[in-house]
Image (tube, rainbow, N blue to C red):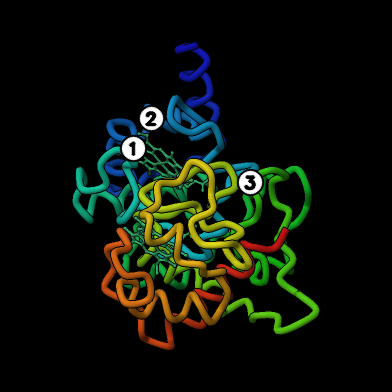
């Protein structure tokens, strides 16, 4: 097992080419090895805590849209066991490392958080299906694809009220910033602190098996749609008195509309 991992790491470093790694890359590599390998493996192809690849062929990181999206996710969510364990510069370095392994940036690069939004993450060039190239700008804005068939974009174009790709990317960012500490939308993950929100649109409140709910939520009689979600998210404790969702409320329309587009998109079968 161990020797397989080492071999994999060698292959990755050979395929990364001969450029001289930056200081930041080296720091990111060391920090990755110390903090992420247990769950994601040295080769990023899966470890004890998570079976899916986090870079390279089939990896889902293009769903974060840009380096900034991935960085946000690392800042807020990783390491999964304790996201506060590493400081921000270390997470920037790890983000560079992950992106270099994915083929988005050369290992000689440095990642400046202020510029990260202008670095798109596309499907790895090693992808089995040639879904990249000219359409890559569209693809980077694709919302969370299901984790099953890699690189199959979710159908963004619905017959009615198709959100723009920009809305979707913005909505996912809002979700990552404001909701993802407690909720997942990943197909394969269950409830975290709150229920998985994949499929939330059209669902009866308090109805996901295995999620922990307050009596108040179970008995609220709500069905989640744009209207009930907008009200609930603006003031959870007013709409569902005694709810256990501790959340200050989301009133900014610049955030609510894209978030709802995102939740609708991940609710499509
Ligand atoms: C204790 C286990 C654990 C550790 C340690 C950990 N992760 Fe994760 N990671 C997970 C799990 C579980 C998920 C899936 C979370 C979800 O679906 O909400 C995940 C998801 C991810 C993803 C998104 C992958 C995808 O398919 O959507 C990235 C990127 C990632 N982790 C990077 C890191 C990095 C970088 C580190 C080290 C700083 C790290 N993780 C440390 C468990 C871990
Ligand atoms: C600090 C953790 C936390 C954050 C942040 C959070 N939630 Fe929740 N959420 C919860 C908990 C806990 C519940 C269960 C509440 C109850 O049962 O009263 C919940 C319940 C919900 C429900 C009802 C789920 C169901 O199956 O009926 C929705 C919808 C929801 N949250 C959406 C969101 C959205 C969208 C965001 C981001 C804008 C968000 N939440 C942010 C913890 C959180």
Mark 1 CB within 8 Å of ligand 1:
yes
The structure residue drawn at horizontal position 60% and vertical position 62%, both measured from the top left corner, is: 203
Circle 1 packing at 10 Å, graded few (<14), some (14-19), many (20+), is: many
Residues at marks 3 and 1, CA–CA distance in whole angstroms: 23 Å
Which residue carries the number 1 mark? 32
Question: Tag 2 or tag 3, which sits nearer the N-term?
Answer: 2
Res 148 → quadrant: top right
Q: Position of residue 16 (x, y in %)?
A: 52, 40
Which residue carries the number 3 mark? 147
Q: Nearer the viewer, residue 180 or 239?
A: 239
Is 63 located above or below residue 250 in the figure? above
Q: Nearer the viewer, residue 238 or 221?
A: 221
Which residue carries the number 2 mark? 37
Residues at marks 2 and 1, CA–CA distance in whole angstroms: 7 Å
Q: Position of residue 35 (x, y in %)?
A: 29, 34
Question: Tag 1 or tag 3, which sits nearer the N-term?
Answer: 1
> Which SS class for mark 3?
loop
Q: Nearer the viewer, residue 15 or 29?
A: 29
The structure residue drawn at horizontal position 70% and vertical position 84%, both measured from the top left corner, is: 161
The answer to whether marks 2 and 1 mark residues whose Cβ atoms lie closer than 8 Å is yes
Q: Is residue 247 left or right of residue 71?
A: left
> Depth-wise, is mark 3 or mark 2 nearer the camera?
3
């Amino acid at each position: 097992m161990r020797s397989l991992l080492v071999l994999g790491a060698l292959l990755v470093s050979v395929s990364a080419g001969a450029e001289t790694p930056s200081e930041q890359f080296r720091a990111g590599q060391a920090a990755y090895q110390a903090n992420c390998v247990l769950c994601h493996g040295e080769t990023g192809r899966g470890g004890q805590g998570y079976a899916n690849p986090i870079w390279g062929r089939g990896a889902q990181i293009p769903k974060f849209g840009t380096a900034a999206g991935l960085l946000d996710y690392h800042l807020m969510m990783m390491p999964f066991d304790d996201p506060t364990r590493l400081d921000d510069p270390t997470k920037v370095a790890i983000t560079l490392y992950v992106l270099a392994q994915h083929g988005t940036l050369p290992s000689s690069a440095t990642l400046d958080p202020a510029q990260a939004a202008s670095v798109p993450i596309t499907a790895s060039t090693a992808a089995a299906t040639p879904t990249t190239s000219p359409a890559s700008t569209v693809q980077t804005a694709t919302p969370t694809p299901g984790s099953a068939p890699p690189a199959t974009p979710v159908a963004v174009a619905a017959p009615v009220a198709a959100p723009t790709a920009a809305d979707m990317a913005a909505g996912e960012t809002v979700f990552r910033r404001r909701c993802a500490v407690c909720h997942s939308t990943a197909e394969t993950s269950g409830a975290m602190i709150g229920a998985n929100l994949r499929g939330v649109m059209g669902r009866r409140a308090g109805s996901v098996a295995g999620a922990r709910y307050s009596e108040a939520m179970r008995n609220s009689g709500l069905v989640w749609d744009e209207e009930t979600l907008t009200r609930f998210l603006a003031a959870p404790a007013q709409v569902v008195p005694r709810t256990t969702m501790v959340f200050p409320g989301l009133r900014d329309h610049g955030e609510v509309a894209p978030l709802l587009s995102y939740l609708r998109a991940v609710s499509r079968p």
